[in-house]
Amino acid sequence: MLLIECPWCGFRAETEFSYGGEAGIVRPADPDALSDAEWADYLFYRRNPRGAHRELWNHAAGCRRWFGVERDAVTYRIERSYTLNDADPAGRAPGSESGTEAHRRSRVGSPAGDGDTARVRSGADAKDDSTANAGAGEQQ
Amino acid sequence: MTAAQPNRLPQGGRIDRTRPLAFTFDGKACEGYAGDTLASALIANGVSLVGRSFKLRRPRGIVGSGAEEPNAIMQLGEGAAAEPNVPATQVELRDGLVARTTRGWPGVRFDVGVINDVFGRMLGAGFYYKTFMYPRSWWKYYEHAIRQSAGFGRAPDAPDPDNYEHMNAHCDVLVAGGGPAGLMAALTAAESGARVILADEQTEFGGSLLGSAERIDGAPAMEWVAVTLARLRDHADCKLLTRSTVFAYHDHNFLTIVERCTDPPETFREGTQIGRSGVDDRHFDDGKPEGRRGPSGRDQPGEHDRRGGHDGRGAPAGRPHRVSNAAGRHDGSAAHIRERLWRVRAGQVILAQGSFERPLVFCNNDRPGVMLASAVSTWINRYGVLPGRRAVIFTNNDSAYRSAIDLADAGAEVAAIVDSRRGGAAELGSRAREHGIAVLEGHVVSDVAGRQHVRGISIARWHGDSWATVSPTIRIDCDLVVMSGGYSPAVHLHSQAGGRLAWDETRLGFLPTESRQPNVSAGAGNGSRSLEECLADGLSAGKEAVSRPGLKGTTVVMPTVSASAENPTEALWRVPAAKDPDRCAKQFIDFQNDTTVADIRLAAREGYRNVEHVKRYTALGFGTDQGKLGNINGMAVLADTLGKAIPEVGTTTFRPAYTPVSFGVGAGESVGELYEPVRKTAIHEWHEAAGAPMEVVGQWHRPWYFPRDGEDLHAAVARESLAVRNSVGLMDASTLGKIDACGPDVVEFLERIYTHDVGRMKVGRCGYGIMLGEDGMLMDDGVLARLGEQRFHLTTTTGGAASVLNWLEKWLQTEWPELRVYLTSLTEQYSTFALAGPDSRKVLDKLGCDIPLDRDSFPFMNVRPAMLAGMPVTLFRVSFSGELAFEINIASNLALAMWNKLMEAGQRFDITPYGTETMHVLRAEKGFVIVGQDTDGSVTPVDLRMNWLLSRNKDFLGKRSLRRPDCLRKDRKQLVGLLSPDARTVLPEGTQLIEEPASRPPVPMCGHVTSSYQSAVLGHPITLALVTGGRARRGEMIYAALPERDPMPVEIVAPVFYDADGQRQHV
């Protein structure tokens, strides 16, 4: 059972939290403008990295706040927890310094992602990004 | 030695000879002493045959003395408290214990299944799969017969009568294992100021020292143990747990310990009366039997007396007395806890679980009377039991020499030590010779004589080739074969924690290396061999665990131990025999699963290379002992057969639990009424008094129907639904989720959540709203009521209340934090009643309402605050029945008063309380769907003909998905109504729908029934269904596939059966 640090309440057992999936998935500003493949990429495709993973957690049985966690998907070691903020509500980056365009960019239509995320992606992941596409939504 | 216990030594051991304990074994009366295990008492009583092997039905005796024991698997106790699959070596002897062998038919001494052994050559690995394959359809018969002959004990046939509890704990250092290394580590950590938990599975601390004659600081080692424990007890922050197995190592240093309780734990002992350990540990309150929580076993008088308690512990030995509330039940009454689950979060973990001695793999090495050397020393030193009169020791290492000396000291004749090593042992070799023991170096035991017990052994010269044949040259008569094949560190917890293992070629075992979590291994589990090494390793592990700021240094010093040099262990994985490996007498690797050298070789010949595959093919390492005894030997033999090195073959995965754990302690207190929370509405007692059966909906207990005069469900529902259609009914809808949404941006927020144009709703208006997942699928529905410019009251389904609030919060916090919206759950603060039927307005009028209720002043789909019968309410003109209806929201503390007023005012209109079943019928007559019943997460609003709710003027969650190709398919399942021509049959919900009545399997399905009821007002059944392309198929006939009868034709109709133009709700 993970020991998770809620940025507001401190370290608590995993049973107090609920999982919210990969952090940094930004809802496209104009869904109607997206192709089916692009929409499917937002809807279904996740990185599932072997290594560092930023994810959203909710202190469901506590303060009920959502926050970000950077966790290693292999060792389960948690590097840090971080609060979400207005500049970066989806939890793309740990800490509050972000909000840059690179971080803000949705994964949709960005073949390689920003430098920060490219580090944790394997070749297969990157390939997914560029080919996430024709008819992929249908297969989901 | 007494007649009753022929193998009991006249003195010695850690047993209490003043406290004899009576027990039965297979119905035979036996006697042991306090401090015995069932295994030691059985040996004391001269019992050597304790079971039959799993597949070959060979007679088996006790091999080990701990968790590794594969053969002595017992059934304990009787009735509800019976416990199957328990190794006798891990059962603390108790007065009145009833133990039975678990295998052998008709009995353990003569088992007809022994025929399997005669034909054992044909019963190699994979025998059942290979033999019982054809015809395939017969497998179910084969399997039944095979399963009958398999298995160990019998599960109890009644609910577990015992109590269990869970306990959370935190510590700086958790030490798993209380042997020399663990004690040393715990002492070091505790004296450094750390909060320490020390847990050991045995009844007392000491580990290997309990069964050895070694000395520390010039005195018997157990005196050092006593001094160490006294020092640990001086530390208030040190918790000592015996009878406590650390059985699982989870993430982030979270470990679980199962404690087998006899008395209340030490921390709760203040002011309580403690009975003798292990005897009168059932605590009664006023002598009344202790009832089990929950519906099935609640306070059944006399039950306790009859069942006699778990493994006989409840025998009426003790005077009833009370334990402190802390150890008792929530209601404060006394309850004995049988097992306690400790859930420990530790800063550091020290793994000091010791090691397992390995058997040697020689012909007929499974005969009763062949034992591990460590077990033999334990029988003698710890239990004062002599397991044989004339022994032969067979070893590849020095440690077994100690057992030879122990045997000689205890008065047994040691015929010979057979040591495979040409150089023999170091110091211990000369000590053995000083005891007059003959040592045969460079020899091996090649075979064992005797069936039901060892009669003698054959000895051959060892040439260093495991796979050659040898000619036995010496035969020795004996009744005990003591074997030692070296030691395997118990690396289970280290591996569970994600740590890596490395093969150590000199110590011949897998040792823990890199840890993934904050832990450190110590002692024999870390590869230490001698007592001195173990103590030193424990000391350094303790220091390492506390080497962080905030803790003072330690003053612990190493005790002095007379170190003795040892010669290295020899790799001897398979002992050569007189015939080749595939034709010689059986050489067992895994005793419990009857896996032999020949089986492993067969698996390799048939192409199995991966150790995990070989495990599953040969059953190596399965069963209650999980390969603690045989795994390393099996892997070594596999490696040898494949021509690989042992580390190349590797180990199988270590998974929790380390030793078997009862279901009861896993459940803990979460059984019966405490299994899950019960949510009751403010009207619950009224419903109960009215005799309503309850339906559980998302933890809520809702009245299902209100039977009158012996009515059944159907009669009651017919009456209730006609009352709503013809006069007035009243339903408690308080369980609907209620969310208050307010803030300057609430309209913008709800626009994004709901599919319709929320902004167009004027204050005082209600609207039916649906929300979709981003995948476009219907997620929840409810009514939005606009109470103010910046305030909405939202309702959700009963089951969706929590998840909808979470969903809304997630969007607000993680996507749109700029929106100033505040959400508050009001589900429990307000109660809701649906007053439905043509006379509903008259009831409100009679009660006295301060606002006009007529159609024009308060039209359909409007909301008004009002005073009703002098109480503040919110009135909603919404209808889930299609009738004129009002929903009344009222603070829950006034709810019952209001309910009673409504019932009273409605009397002259024959107001009828109705339950969830009638509510379902009424809404189905109108074609209103229930999310989660008529939908299943794969249904879009378009499939439900709800296009009118989908705004074209804005984006909302899930909107884009409705244009995905899959959502545009013409053959999606769509909501339709079904009518059967016979107007009688109510189709079961879930019924599959098919196109043709006479299709041959596989029959294509075109949909299924989602809701189906008898409609009282219509006089015939009504059915809602999802049918492929259904909306365009009105008037077509399809067929309902029914079990045990012909498919029934049904006609596709519109899914609204009553008042299709919706006039009745507008009056």
Image (cartoon, rainbow, N blue to C red):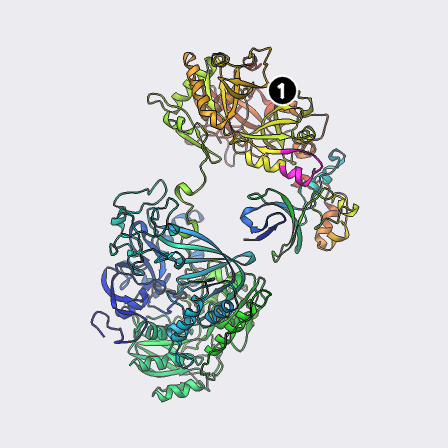
Q: Nearer the viewer, residue B697 or B364?
A: B697
Residue visible at 25% across and 61% down in the picture: B23
Magenta stretch encompasses residue B810: yes
x and y percentages locating residue B296 in the rendered image: 34, 41
Q: Is residue B938 visible?
A: yes
Instruction: Identify residue for label 1.
Output: B765
Indicate the quadrant containing the N terminus of chain B: top left, top right, bottom left or bottom right.
Answer: bottom left
x and y percentages locating residue B902 in the rendered image: 45, 18
Magenta stretch encompasses residue B771: no
Left or right: where does residue B370 sit relative to residue B485? left
Q: Which residues are magenta?
A: B809-822
Instruction: Return the chain for callout 1.
Output: B
Left or right: where does residue B378 sit relative to residue B902? left
Residue reaching furthest right? A101
Residue reaching furthest left? B3
Q: Quadrant of residue B225?
A: bottom left
Left or right: where does residue B819 sit relative to residue B143? right
x and y percentages locating residue B771 in the rendered image: 62, 31
Q: Is residue B1052 visible?
A: no
x and y percentages locating residue B251 in the rendered image: 55, 56
Q: Nearer the viewer, residue B1027 or B569?
A: B569
Give the structural element (helix, strand or loop) at label 1.
Answer: loop
Quick check: B289 above or below B627? above
Quick check: B597 above or below B498? below
Indicate the quadrant containing the C terminus of chain B: top left, top right, bottom left or bottom right.
Answer: top right
